[in-house]
């Protein structure tokens, strides 16, 4: 095989090489069997965990040698892999929280009032219309709005038994499975909870629901940074975050803080891109006109400054507000201006996730250690 240039070694190269290694007596390769975990690459140094079901597996040493040989054959003799493969056993591995979910995406904003939940709902619908299996969790515990935006305020999720566990069955509309604390509280009463109560509520929406197989799980976070954000990254391995902003300076300043939280060393969640909402106002009777009432291209310029991908600019039109109030997300109508805008954002997000999954190892849950 041709040697891959050193600078191009990414996790996908490693898994491609290891797919040539089959477990003895099986027709499946070790990647398909989920035996390869925790891939890490540093220059030419490759390390990962090889997970066996039993501690007395007779094939442990031969499998390690087979992995070393496969990597050297596929990536070149210069790779450093000897003594970098860690043997682990299934009983030592932590049970995945959402095993059927391929990608977990946090939808965040530096401040309130930028239309984050509106973007989250319409992005979920746009992804579903593209053929993806999509879930959405309303993690804005103190201001749940997703039931209304889906026209499901009077709906109450039912329970179902899965693998012997009593789980909540998510509500499904427009091809999106979703849950919100709004389904379980009186809509007319304020939610007055301390941090631990709110965090436990979010964990229940994540862990005590029957989500099944999903391509994307979107998490609509509260504005700013809070206990909810920490609970999320401690509970789930988040694939990446999307930041929603509006063009004006006060919103953009908060984007920097929100972005730095995800990119901090202790959290280390990739920021997939930025969405500029309310980028301009377009009246229905003059669809070609653009009025930059909140400023022009503020989000685009900030994305360039921070080195982020601008996933799209969403115009401010009356149909977005009407769709949210009436429970019919505008993204469900791909023939409209805003429907097309969300379809394009969804397509760019899917591409960014593909690139992220090729170039970076899977995100790990954040572990807080007490000193």
Image (tube, rainbow, N blue to C red):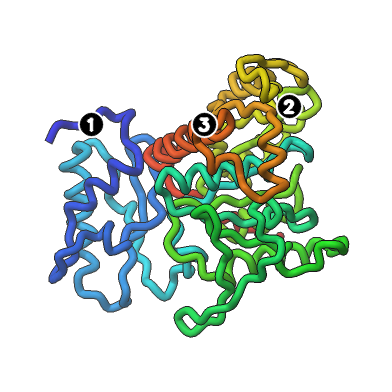
Q: Is residue 75 left or right of residue 279?
A: left
Q: Residue at x 53, y 79 (%)?
A: 160
Quick one: SS at disc 3?
Answer: helix
Q: Which residue is mark 1?
A: 4
Residue that label 3 marks? 340
Q: Which mark is residue 341?
A: none
Earlier-in-chain disc, 1 versus 3: 1
Q: Is residue 188 left or right of residue 357?
A: right
Q: Are marks 1 and 3 in contact (CB under 8 Å)?
A: no
Task: Identify the secondary structure beneath mark 1.
Answer: loop
Across and down, in percent, residue 38 comes to: 41, 54
- Few, some or many C-alpha atoms within 10 Å of disc 3 (few <14, some 14-19, many ≥20)? some
Task: Give the secondary structure at mark 2.
Answer: helix
Q: Is label 2 or label 3 in front?
A: 3
Q: Nearer the viewer, residue 216 or 91?
A: 216
Residue 295 percent across, percent down from the top left: 74, 17
The disc placed on residue 252 is 2
Q: Quadrant of the N terminus?
A: top left
Q: Quadrant of residue 114?
A: top right
Looking at the image, which residue is at 70% across and 22% down?
283
Image position, residue 76 (x, y; %): 20, 36
Quick check: 218 left or right of 103?
Answer: right
Specify whether 79 is left or right of 308.
left
**Which badge, 2 or 3, comes first in the chain's sequence?**
2
- Circles 2 and 3, Cβ within 8 Å, touching? The answer is no
């Amino acid at each position: 095989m041709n040697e891959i240039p050193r600078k191009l070694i990414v996790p996908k190269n490693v898994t491609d090489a290891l797919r040539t290694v089959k477990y003895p007596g099986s027709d499946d390769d070790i990647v398909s069997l989920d035996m390869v975990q925790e891939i890490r690459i540093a220059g030419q140094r490759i390390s990962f965990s090889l997970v066996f079901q039993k501690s007395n597996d007779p094939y442990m040493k031969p499998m390690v040698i087979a992995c070393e040989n496969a990597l050297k054959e596929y990536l070149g003799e210069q790779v450093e892999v000897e003594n970098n493969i860690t043997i682990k056993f299934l009983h030592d591995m932590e049970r995945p929280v959402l095993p059927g979910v391929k990608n977990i995406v946090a939808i965040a904003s530096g401040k309130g009032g930028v239309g984050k939940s509106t973007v989250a709902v319409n992005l979920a619908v746009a992804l579903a219309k593209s053929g993806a299996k999509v879930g959405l969790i309303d993690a804005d515990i103190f201001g749940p709005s997703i039931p209304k935006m889906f026209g499901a305020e009077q709906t109450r999720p039912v329970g179902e038994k899965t693998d012997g566990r009593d789980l909540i069955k998510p509500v499904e509309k427009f091809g999106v499975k979703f849950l919100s604390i709004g389904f379980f509280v009186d809509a007319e009463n304020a939610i007055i909870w301390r941090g631990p109560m709110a965090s436990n509520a979010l964990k229940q929406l994540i862990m005590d629901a029957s989500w099944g197989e999903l391509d994307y799980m979107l998490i609509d976070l509260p504005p700013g940074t809070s206990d909810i954000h920490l609970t999320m990254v401690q509970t789930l391995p988040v694939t990446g975050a999307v930041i929603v902003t509006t063009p004006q300076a006060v919103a953009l300043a908060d984007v920097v803080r929100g972005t730095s939280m995800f990119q901090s060393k202790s959290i280390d969640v990739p920021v997939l891109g930025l969405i500029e909402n309310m980028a301009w106002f377009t009246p229905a009777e003059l669809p070609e006109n653009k009025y930059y009432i909140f400023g022009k291209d503020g989000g685009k310029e900030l994305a360039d400054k921070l080195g982020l991908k601008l996933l799209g600019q969403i115009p401010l039109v009356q149909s977005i507000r009407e769709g949210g109030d009436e429970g019919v997300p505008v993204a469900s109508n791909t023939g409209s201006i805003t429907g097309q805008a969300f379809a394009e954002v969804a397509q760019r997000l899917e591409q960014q996730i593909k690139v992220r999954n090729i170039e970076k190892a899977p995100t790990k849950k954040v572990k807080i250690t007490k000193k």
